[in-house]
Image (cartoon, grey):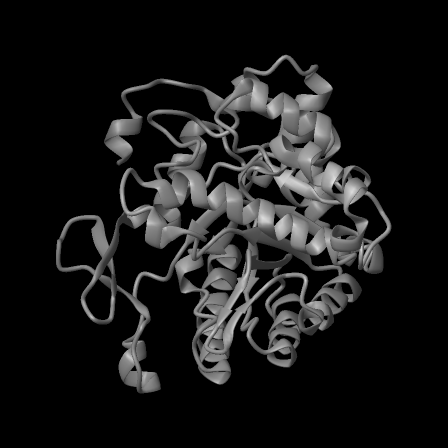
Amino acid sequence: TQSTWGCVSRTNMQQHPCLRVDVHTHCLPKEIPNLKAKYGYGGFIRLDHSCGGNKADMVLDDGAFFRKVESNLWDMEERVRYMDFVGCDVQVLSTVPVMFSYWAKPLDCLDLCQFLNNDIAAKVNEFPNRFIGLGTLPMQDAGLAVQELTRCVKELGLAGVQIGSHIDTNRGKVCLSSRDLFPVFEAAEKLGAAIFVHPWDMMGSDLMQKYWLPWLVGMPAETCFAICSMMLADVFIKFPKLRVCFAHAGGSFPATVGRIQHGFDCRPDLCAIDTNVPPREQAKLFWVDSLTHDKLALELVASVIGKDKICLGSDYPFPLGECYPLKRPGDQIDESDFDQDTKDDMLCNNALVWLGVPKSRFQRD
């Protein structure tokens, strides 16, 4: 709450002269319609505000509890006050991945995406110098996804879209290596739309019922899976102007790139069937956020991915993020041994290159 923030006095803009752009934050509309009633079947998320105060429960329409959230998920005035307190100039807004709903009927998912994207656009329009928006797409139908991607960019003014680490459709799971998704990547490249890949529906969750392991172990694996799927399918080579950023500092990919490269070298019959560009070379062709929670891990990411491809990302407002009161967005970058120019690039410039947004839009007075 704001009263909690007030217990720490900081003059953020003086302490942090560099513009700070947080590429990884999530939001929702305050009210979500009864999607089960609207579409005629269940499985969707709704917000239950009956707990009162500034909190709500994210629950499935069968009543199963998913997560408790607070009003900073939908109240942008409260969010801006938080940003001012922690010294964050700009947030990139994207939906909560559980809302992807790729398993739903394509036209129903399109309708839901339009509802969520319109809300994000409205939030950006309310504070155009504080927010950048990323939409969500009905990825289970490439044609509809391209249609909504085009609307996001040309009509809503969003900078791009967020997609999942795989597409969990009602026909089965689809990897990001699938040729069926190439029209979406081609359209994003032509439109100049950025793509943010976020893990969801984590592999192995059935075996990881304790200790929050789907989030601690499954998410990093999902992100590595997404990177390898796109990389080994030659996506970054076929679409060289496509700008893709992966959440959570690329997950487990930076730590396992040696194994991935060795597999590519020793078993090209299995790994190099769709691309002849080595993984270590392709690792320089995409962006990642900075969310490592570890100094040495961030240095490894910089070595593997590149200092020019790391963007500040906090995962606000969720507890695994770099969020107050335990942490502040950008702490890991600030506390690193990189020189100040490199820190400034990670805090701002790299993000704006990935997003294709000019810094002049956000320049301070």
Name the side, left or right, on which 274 lies relative to 343. Answer: right
Please say if 328 is above or below 187: above
Tell me what residue is drawn at x 19 percent, y 59 percent: 49
* Percent coordinates x, y for residue 101 in the rendering: 43, 69
Residue 149 appears in which quarter of the rendering? bottom right
Number of callouts: 0
* Percent coordinates x, y for residue 132 in the rendering: 57, 51
Please say if 348 is above or below 7: below
Give whichever of 303, 266 is nearer the camera. 266
* Percent coordinates x, y for residue 291 in the rendering: 52, 33
Can residue 364 be seen? no
Name the side, left or right, on which 231 lies relative to 335. Answer: right
Tell me what residue is drawn at x 66 percent, y 55 percent: 229
**Which image quarter is the N terminus in?**
top left
Tell me what residue is drawn at x 65 percent, y 80 percent: 143
**Which image quarter is the C terminus in?**
top right
Q: Residue furthest right?
A: 276
Q: Residue furthest bottom?
A: 40
Give whichever of 229, 85 is nearer the camera. 229
Residue 213 appears in which quarter of the rendering? top left
Name the side, left or right, on which 176 lies relative to 8. Answer: right
* Percent coordinates x, y for residue 21 in the rendering: 58, 37
Give whichever of 176, 70 is nearer the camera. 176
Please say if 178 is above or below 237: below
Tell me what residue is drawn at x 69 percent, y 40 percent: 260
Residue 216 appears in which quarter of the rendering? top left
Can residue 52 be seen? yes
